[in-house]
Image (spheres, helix red, strand yellow):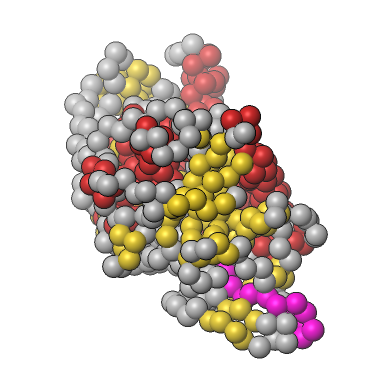
Amino acid sequence: MRRVDLPERPDWRARCEQIGFDWHTMYGAAYWTESYAYALSEAEIDRLDDATAELYGLCMRAVDVACDTPGLLDKLQIPAALHDLVRQSWREGDKDLYGRFDLRFEADQIKLYEFNADTPTGLYESSVVQWLWLEEQRQAGLLPAASDQFNSLHERLCDALPVLAGNKTLYMASAHAAREDEGTVDYLIDCAQQAGIRTVKLDAADIGVCAENWLRDARDGQLIQRLFKLIPWETMARSTMAPTLLNSGRFLIEPAWKMILSNKGLLPLLWELFPGHELLLAASWERPAGDAAAYVEKPIFSREGQNIRIYSTDGALIQDTGGEYGAERTIFQEYAPPPKFETGYVVIGSWIVAGQPAGICLREDDGIVTFNLSRFVPHYFVKESDNA
Amino acid sequence: MRRSRSIKLLFMSASVVALTACGEEIQTGVYDTVERCALENPVAECEKSLAAARQVHEETAPRFQAKEDCEQEFGPGRCEPSGVTGGVAGGAAGEQQQASAGSTFIPFMMGYMLANSLRSSSVAAQPVYQRNGASGFFTGTGSKVSDGLGRTMVNSASSVAKAPAMRAPIVARGGFSSYSAAS
């Protein structure tokens, strides 16, 4: 993988906004960045593809174990009232839609940092914006004609949504105050409508409950029988409306068993099940002993790089990102910073849709922890035979 | 397949109008057994509806954290831990099973409503329940389906045609709205 300087498309902001990607600049800083890109080899793409499929397989095994092992759902801090729901959703095969593995990729070694299994964002950028960039830069002759992208997100999402929706109206919810979240939902609505699914978009504030404790569209009282929610399960499980999940919980996308995976407790769980696995970093529930290698402490529900603490080999705290999470328990993971390129540290997000690897996105940050302010940098690869 | 070939977008952020439908009166029936159903209907349809109703029962039966709360709604001895039995009415054998911590209670499925469809509308197969101190059969959310077993008419647009009620007053909202989602 190498970093390649490229001219920006002169009208890229307008092009992005034309297709609804109006959060290309956030918090006063560039989010979408195309003055350079990352070029990978086909062999590297193959390895990422295989690793993603394998990691998903390990995760499925972890869910199985978590559902069958007494005490494990408690350890993952899933409320006891929802344990039956989690087990039922898993044993009866409720399907999941998507997730994003965040990977360390250096010197041909791939390691899992974490799995955003419940509410990953960056989807539209990865699927459509990045692809449009490739096509236009190829047409402009700035990228080799044979350049390609690891990106089958759009097709896979459009294929998966009808299966998940069945013949039901698909309600699509996020907090509309968060533009990035709403943009992700807008994109999925577009996919769903192309597949012929009736969709209703609603703000998280408009999800309501009736006296019989079913989830409803609060604007008209309609029963919600399929709900894509860009709202974390752990948030819903702890809200005043949580009791309604006993009734309507099986209607949600992602399914309840994703609570096991969207939880950083997954990391020590995986390490216990597959100790020394080449795709995993060592992880534990307990703080490593004093003479251990450097490690990172992560709250089990942290998002966007918040409340991450990094400790050196002698156990001294060397970085604390701070933030709003961390009231819940924490886990510990071997310290392995992302590889550094000329402009920053790069983490690869690898998408999985309906159990199939579906492409990658690259996030670059000035620091070793990837935040929501990290830059999104497009990628391409060139087939080996065309590379000569 | 690795790369996208073409990406088509219809209209990002389109708003959608909810569908409304007018109903038709549809003949259906409420039965406690396939045998009783088969006196009035093809046996294959009876079996199919029972299987579908059982599934709806498992997915949408009202759930309670305390057995007493369930029995108050549905009657003494008419509730069981969820995931224990799957029978119609005769599920009494399973009622003595102990619930594990964290489990929930649901009412016994006392019968089922036969699925039927006309050209443009339909009623779905669904479980029916009896309620504490009331005669007849009810959906899981309390809408009356019939006074007894046998044939009955249901309006396809009524809440009875589908379980639970498609439209109901809201008693709380916004509980899921304070969070940051992106990850």
Extreme residue toward the top, this view: B42
State the residue at coordinates (63%, 75%).
A296
Query: Is residue A272 positioned above or below A256 on the image?
Result: below
Residue A272: which quarter of the image? bottom right
Judging depth in this view, the residue of A143 and A109 nearest the camera is A143
Extreme residue toward the front, this view: A388
Work out which quarter of the rendered image holds the C terminus of chain A and state it. top right
State the residue at coordinates (51%, 72%).
A367
Total tally of numbered discs in the picture: 0
Q: Let me know if residue A141 is in the magenta part.
A: no
Q: Position of residue A3 (x, y in %)?
A: 52, 53
Q: Position of residue A23 (x, y in %)?
A: 30, 55
Q: Main secondary structure of the magenta part?
A: loop
| A55 lies left or right of B164 | right
Residue A181: which quarter of the image? bottom left
State the residue at coordinates (45%, 78%).
A323
Query: Is residue A110 positioned above or below B3 on the image?
Result: below
| A173 lies left or right of A333 | left
Q: Position of residue A382 (x, y in %)?
A: 56, 36
Judging depth in this view, the residue of A297 and A354 nearest the camera is A297
Query: Is residue A189 positioned above or below A229 on the image?
Result: above
Judging depth in this view, the residue of B172 and B64 nearest the camera is B172
Q: Let me know if residue A288 is in the magenta part.
A: yes
Q: Is residue A27 visible?
A: yes
State the residue at coordinates (54%, 46%).
A39
**What span is in magenta?**
A287-304
Q: Position of residue B155 (x, y in %)?
A: 26, 27
Q: Is residue A207 visible?
A: no
